Amino acid sequence: APPLAPSSQELDAPPGTAPPSHQDSLSPLDVFNLAANHSAPLPSVSQPAPSLPLSSIPSLSSPSIIATKTSIHHALTPSTVTVRDTQDKLDLELGGPSLGDETAPLFYQPGKRGFYSPRLSRPSEVRLNAFRNVGRLIGLCLLQNELCPLFLNRHVIKYILGRPVRFHDLAFFDPVIYESLRQLVVDAEKPGSDNATALQALDLTFSIDLCIEEGGGSIELINNGRDIEVTNVNIYQYVRKYAEYRMITAQEKALKKLREGLFDVIPAGSLDTLTAEDFRLLLNGVGDINVTTLIGYTSFNDESGESNDRLVTFKRWLWAVIEKMSPMEKQDLVYFWTGSPALPASEEGFQPMPSVTIRPADDSHLPSANTCISRLYIPLYSSKQILKSKLIMAIKTKNFGFV
């Protein structure tokens, strides 16, 4: 496994970085959420761990440390989960069937909605092979210059690339817990007995409670961890072990299979020069649709037979409507147009380049698209308002078929 070795300086907030932006649309990704049993219904998406605002916590000498205690013990332990029951333990130990685990989603969202980590659950041969197949799909997307709708957490990408996974990667995995732990370290470093007393009052030990997606129950981060108190002296060891277990150890078998599957398709060493950010751009494209970039990619075909002045005016209407769309509407448009909700990282990623065909004047029909060739068909509407309403209606309907 990649080493996890943060220094004391590394525990400060990463400058100029933030967890990936919020995303609501999950429609292309649902296919990845099925486990081995394809007849199982699509699972509901787990919600981010709840947090407790610092302002709502009664102040002692260190409010941020109290917030840490609340976040760790309540955000990580759903009220319906304590430890696995006896039958589940027997099933796991004897290798017997556990249908709930076997058909669980392959991925879950530990923090930011729309970004996924593998969920090991019961590591049967079939389930591990499913992770390997997902890795192969990712490899095929990279090999064929296709965008993949599966947005992986940063530490997953770093593990695949063989990069060290560090404490700061927890900010992209679970930003609430990351901030609580970071503040805990900052407070523990401050001189004075009050902070040491506040940390001691939290009664933290080297054991943590896990949510069901990460195995459930309570585990020890080190030998006899339940009997070892977290202090100012060993706080760095605690946060390193905490981050390592939640991001790597709890799901390592699944992570290994993802990496194996990817390199079944991509030659070993071909990704050595990439950073995690480079890999994400190649795999997922640019989620923020830049209209200027889209204009540069797009060509027009005319089937309307109208004058050039009328066509120029219509093109201006089209780009003005797109420019004023919300970020989600722009993603919906590109998805309707090309079959992908994002733009590729470079011009070479479009195969073929996007185009718009202007059809004869007709205010009664909606725009249509041929995603195989990235072509959008739009009738020559009589006004900008009609163009806007018809285009929005078409991209929001999301009803696809052959025409």
Image (cartoon, rainbow, N blue to C red):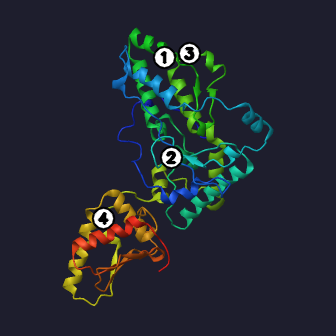
What amino acid does circle 1 point to? Leu
What amino acid does circle 2 point to? Asn
What amino acid does circle 4 point to? Val
Label 3 residue SS: loop
Q: Is residue 86 visible?
A: yes
Q: Quadrant of the N terminus?
A: top right
Label 2 residue SS: loop
The quadrant in which residue 252 appears is: top right
The answer to the question of whether label 2 and label 4 lie on touching residues, with beta carbons closer than 8 A, is: no
Coordinates of residue 50 in the picture (x, y in percent): 45, 34
Distance (Cα) linking label 2 and label 4: 27 Å
Distance (Cα) linking label 1 and label 4: 51 Å
Distance (Cα) linking label 4 and label 3: 55 Å
Q: Is residue 348 left or right of residue 38?
A: left
Front position in the image: 266 or 138: 138
Q: Which residue is mark 3?
A: 229
Coordinates of residue 403 in the picture (x, y in percent): 47, 80
Q: Which residue is mark 4?
A: 291
Distance (Cα) linking label 1 and label 3: 10 Å
Residue occupying image coordinates x 34% and y 62% = 330
Q: Which residue is mark 1?
A: 202
Distance (Cα) linking label 2 and label 3: 31 Å
